[in-house]
Amino acid sequence: MIKFIEEPTRIKAAGNKPKVIEEFIGRVNSKTEAISIAHMRSPGGWIEPGQTPEFDEYTVVLKGSLRVKTKSEAFEVKAGQAIIVSKGEWVQYSSPHPDGADYVAVCLPAFALTTVHRDE
């Protein structure tokens, strides 16, 4: 079976500032539960609550820089770099630099509000 995706669906993001999430493949846009693929654009100074998701997340930064913090370390993921966060790992994403971040996130299985387990 082939499923052509004509355009993404814009999804509301968590965090202190507006972030653009365009889901191409996932539970919302393509009704796909196995994987989600989304293009993200976060402004400078954006930060989201920490989370302990039930999915693996693969992130490739296209422009700018994304800060990825775990309980034991923090990474500055710059354009042309990537990071993998395994399910069950507490993580917090932010884009503290003025230019923000433009990146692609892939979640296996697909992202869901019921499985992301964000901090209160």
Image (cartoon, rainbow, N blue to C red):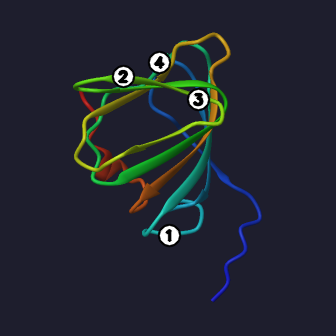
User: Where is 23 relative to 27, above or below?
Assistant: above
What residue sits right under mark 4 in the picture?
16
- What kind of element bears circle 2? strand
Q: Earlier in the sequence, mark 1 or mark 2?
A: 1
Residue 83, percent from left and from top: 46, 40
Q: Earlier in the sequence, mark 4 or mark 2?
A: 4
Disc 2: CA contacts within 10 A as few (<14), some (14-19) or many (>=20): few
Q: Amino acid at mark 1?
A: Thr
Q: Amino acid at mark 4?
A: Asn
Which quadrant would residue 103 be assigned to in this image?
A: top right
Q: Are marks 4 and 1 in contact (CB under 8 Å)?
A: no
User: Where is 28 relative to 61, above or below?
Assistant: below
Name the residue at 47% across, 64% down. 35
Q: Is residue 93 left or right of residue 37?
A: left
What residue sits right under mark 2 in the picture?
74
Disc 4: CA contacts within 10 A as few (<14), some (14-19) or many (>=20): few
Residue 33, percent from left and from top: 43, 68
| Distance from the alpha carbon under mark 4 to that under mark 1 | 28 Å
Q: Is residue 22 left or right of residue 91?
A: right
What residue sits right under mark 1 in the picture?
32
Which dot marks residue 19?
3
